[in-house]
Amino acid sequence: MSVPSFPRRLVFLAVALLGVLYAFAPGLTPEEARLVQRIRAAQGALWAHQEALGLPLSRQDDPERTGFVGVEWSPLTTTLGELPAKRTAANPLFGVQCLRWFRQAGLVPGDRIVLFSSSSFPGLLFSALAAAESAGLEVTLVVSLGSSTWGANRPQFPWPAMGRFLRREGFLRTLPVAYTLGGDYETGGGLSEEGRVLLERVAREDGVPLWTASGTPEQRLRGMTDRKMALIESVHPKLVVSVGGSHANLGDREAVLALQPGLLDPSQGGQAGDGVIGRSLRRGLPVLHLLEMKTLCARTGIGYDAPFRRSLGTSPWAAAAGLGLFAGALASFRRFRFTETGKTNPDS
């Protein structure tokens, strides 16, 4: 019995559809393309530098060799995190997305933003900083040094060491105005004594003040939140950026967990909790809330735990062109032909 050949029109259709998807993939502007190149160059340099230091890097844990994926556990680890989320957070397209959010917020060169970040997503932190610098924004930066698993939690190379290297190599200009220990109440809760001592030392080596607070756990959290809000009031930013889940940023009320990540409008402040995010929104400031990587990916079109690619999202023109090709192929591909009224003969 002979096997019918695969219809050539269907082969043509498949090839044409692939071509359409490639041709109509949303491209990057020249500025965005330069930003991606800058981030990838920084990642390559960071990986090579850690290799030169003899750190045990893993291509399995960090297949794109970003240098921003840490280890499962160390004295700097405060909580559990997901390895796929940390890999995803290092995608350079998040820098592009931050750039677009800055534009959406109406920011122009010379505007100031305040960026509060944990060390749990160092790749996302760097991308946000690189995007802000690319946009000509002035950045006031505070970083919490404790990290969840797989973040910037290598004792030999925590975020301050990463930041120093990136500044020295010209990939970054912004110097933090303060550090916190992070963890519970943002004063080192959950850190081992070894981790606390190490982070206090690296903060001193950086010449950056380490914010602390005393009292009961609730008083310490309130103190750290108040200190961050005082900084916001002193520099008058146009936007507050929160990267990761620092305790003072989120606060203690469950309402903040219902917030969708991304660019938040001040109208959402009523249900945003008692942390920096909620208090900033209620003061009329927009907030860029960068957390929950799966949701961020679903909203932006960036692949979750996927190989890095060159574009963001999907294009309606690709869908329209693909449907047009498919309709044309169906119109020209005669699976059956009519012979007499009410009867058909197969073409095969």
Image (cartoon, helix red, strand yellow):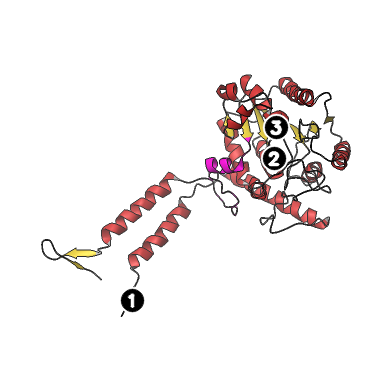
Q: If you read the primary sequence from the N terminus, does the residue marked by circle 2 or circle 1 appear first?
A: 1
Side (left or right) of 289 relative to 119: left
Q: Is residue 284 visible?
A: no
Helix, strand or loop at label 1? It is loop
Three-letter residue code for mark 3: Leu
Residue 191: image quadrant is: top right
Depth check: 338 or 239 in front?
Answer: 338
Which numbered marker is on residue 125?
2
Q: Residue at x 27, y 60 (%)?
A: 332
Tag 1 residue: 3
Q: If you read the primary sequence from the N terminus, does the residue marked by circle 3 or circle 2 appear first?
A: 3
Q: Which residue occupies the extreme left position in the image?
A: 341
Asked whether residue 309 is drawn in magenta, I would say yes
Q: Point out the image quarter for the N terminus.
A: bottom left
Q: Vertical placement of 276 versus 341: above or below?
A: above
Three-letter residue code for mark 1: Val
